[in-house]
Image (cartoon, helix red, strand yellow):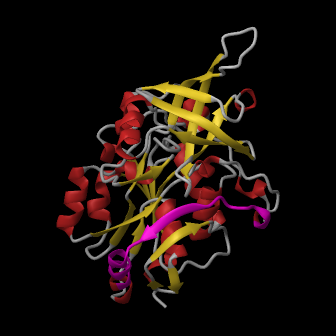
Amino acid sequence: MHLSDFDFDLPENLIATRPVAPRSAARLLWCEGENTFDRQVSDLVDILRPGDRLVLNETKVIPARLFGTRHRPEAVGGSGKAAIEVTLLSFTPQAQWNALVRPLRKVSIGERIEFGSGLIAILVDKFGGQAVLSFNLVGEDFDTALAKIGKMPLPPYIAAKRPADDQDKLDYQTVFARTQGSVAAPTASLHFDAEILSALAEKGIELTYVTLHVGAGTFLPVKADLIKDHKMHSETGYVSPKAAAEINQTLESGRRVIPVGTTALRLIETAAKKKGVIAPWSGATDIFIYPGYKFKIASGLMTNFHLPKSTLLMLVSALMGQIRVKEIYDHAITKNYRFFSYGDASLLIPSEADKVD
């Protein structure tokens, strides 16, 4: 299976740079088995069955993009100052941050970067094109400064078209975000607002919350020609005992478990003990789901429309089959569905979804 098997032509005008409002007014392409229906996200209340369980990722995106000034006290023949852009990637056990720094080659170990609001970082190490930064503020003081001066780390295909602004701090965050740690949003969950969550509960549709912190690796291109040779990035997550018990109860009763977003799906499949059984879990996962994978927990998936040649497109192809996904994406393009993080959604239910081993 080759990378080219997951390529398609996408018109530039279908890449969404802003979400629709309200959130649940986004279009929804409902694909169940061989049937395809054009709906809206708000129609989930009518589409889903009482007893279905949606699994939602409650990770919270941090405003991880910072703009600062490098200070080099020993500078000779110049001011020693230069503009620096930093994107935080992950917090380390040493209470430091792995980050992308631009231009990294112009910053030396030991140099100070000042960002404003009293936030200062020292470059303590470089590795693999990344930097390790130590900040002068920690805990709530760090969070407060970051909230004031940080920008949302929009996906590259949006950032290339416009800069992040204050509206993105609302738009690029789910309404149920709780646990801080992501540098990218679980975008399928962006379609949910308080009204639709309440309506789903009234219908008898169950909700379970899990946490997978989405890393910048989600935007990395696949470079291997043979899919099996691709090395998946690692992300940390948590399935609580309560969440595992809720999911197991649903599966035991023969009802459907539908993760919202590929992050939630990858997490619950990582935590699966066997077909139809999930266990509490925490740690790092680099699970790579592509055609041939046998799903253990997920009965379907709600997700946005993904990039060509991406691991996310490979995941939905594993769920629905490559031929069916091509049909779905051809339909979405013909009908002018909006693509990627701020775009429209799909509800994918394979023909086998009702079968429980």
Question: What segment is highlighted magenta in the picture?
Answer: 228-248
Q: Which residue sits furthest right?
A: 225
Residue 268, how many percent across, how many down?
48, 72
Q: Which one is in front, 47 or 78?
A: 78
Quadrant position of residue 179: bottom left
Name the residue at the front extreme.
74
In depth, the one of 339 and 327 nearer the eye is: 339
Q: Position of residue 5 (x, y in %)?
A: 75, 58
Which residue sits at x=77%, y=56%?
3
Q: Is residue 224 above or below residue 132?
A: below
Can residue 13 be seen here? The reply is: no
Q: Is residue 239 magenta?
A: yes
Residue 146 vs 24, above or below: the answer is: above
Q: Is residue 153 above or below residue 218?
A: above
- In the image, residue 148 lies at what x, y percent? 37, 30
Where on the picture, by quarter, is residue 291?
A: bottom right
Q: Which quadrant of the view contains residue 292?
A: bottom right
Q: Residue furthest top?
A: 77
